[in-house]
Amino acid sequence: MRTKTKILGIETSCDETAAAVVEDGSRIISDVVASQIDIHARYGGVVPEVASRQHLLTIIPVVSQAMTEISWQDINGIAVTFGPGLAGSLLVGVNVAKAIALAKKLPITGVNHLEAHIYANWLDPPPAGENGRVKFPCLCLIVSGGHSDLVLMKGHGQFEKLGRTRDDAAGEAFDKAARILDLGYPGGPAIERAARSGIPCLPLPRAWLKGSHDFSFSGLKTALWHLVHKGGVSVADVAASFQLAIVDVLVAKTIEAAKQLKVEQILLSGGVAANKTLTRHFLASSPVPVLIPPPHLCTDNAAMVAACGYYHFQAGKISGYDLDVVPSLSLG
Ligand code: KG4
Ligand code: ZN
């Protein structure tokens, strides 16, 4: 009898080609991420057709590398992101996953990229926060390049969406602000770096959207544009003020929802959760434990897809060979 379940995860939803093998939903055996950042940086953002072609070139070497230490006979199933994301990019991962499943006679499960981000909190090393283990019900804040979602998680696979962004996602706001400030792509890490030598002293608006769990960051981006074009401000101070405006709103609204819903924990995930100012403010002001995956598991990777896939297989969620991509897939 097999005691350990090993899942191969495949992720190609945006500009990272990734494959990973994870045991029992937590122990990472391999974790390979081929980033296309250098290729897209010259355009100032992700170019969809360039991204899908790059996935096509990289996917087989990435999967092979993830499988170097392990035999195919030891793999029990394949988990692949089928949405949300760029259609052409998703198609590459889903097709390769199906081909491998067919050739190796393995079951396949389609994974929602947003659900996968949440499952970074189950991976080893455990997330920072109270003994690093998840307790239900928990409140998940997913902050990435395409989403700022607040989701109540009552158990594995049980999600209820409470709030979302009404315009720009948190990561998108960082990327657009960095473009205005000429700091390069991706914007989040660039703004965080610039903000280190600045003081958050400039007045920038916060959209509280009282009575709703939704977020809005486009007004903040416009205010930043006006501030920069008026002149006479330092880039470091603008970056620090902008970063704090986003952090203030994300932290206050998430904690307010956590109190209302009386959850056990808050789970952070998505690329923006790699931001140190965000995590410091959460840890300093939350009355409930906040779980934060290490930065490399916050940004796109396939280990989180494999971890999520493990719980899908446990629940009997298996996809057919007709699995299609769903670019606008949502969670809850
Ligand atoms: O989760 P992710 O890797 O990909 C998507 O699913 O979108 O998130 C990427 C986003 C980008 O917008 C990037 O600027 C942002 O996460 N990001 C950060 C940081 N690292 C990545 N934002 C703020 N601070 C960071 N350190
Ligand atoms: Zn992502």
Image (cartoon, rainbow, N blue to C red):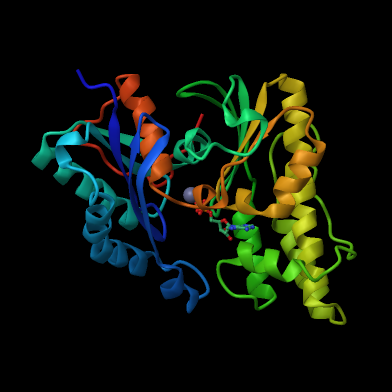
- The answer to which quarter of the image holds residue 321 is top left
Residue lying farthest to the front in this orientation: 69
- Image height check: is 313 above or below 113? above
Whether residue 83 is visible to the viewer of this picture, yes or no, is yes
Q: Picture coordinates of residue 201 (x, y %)?
A: 90, 64
Nearest the viewer among 119 and 49 is 119
Q: Picture coordinates of residue 189 (x, y %)?
A: 62, 64
- The answer to which quarter of the image holds residue 71 is top left
Image quarter where the N terminus lies is: top left
Q: Residue at x 85, y 63 (%)?
A: 200
Q: Residue at x 29, y 26 (%)?
A: 4
Q: Picture coordinates of residue 13 (x, y %)?
A: 39, 52
Q: Picture coordinates of residue 56 (x, y %)?
A: 25, 62
On screen, residue 214 versus residue 238, left or right, reads left
On screen, residue 123 versus residue 309, left or right, reads right
Whether residue 212 is visible to the viewer of this picture, yes or no, is no
On screen, residue 205 versus residue 264, left or right, reads right
Nearest the viewer among 132 and 275 is 132
Q: Quadrant of ligand 1?
A: bottom right
On screen, residue 241 versus residue 49, left or right, reads right
- Image height check: is 160 above or below 89? above
Q: Residue at x 64, y 52 (%)?
A: 170
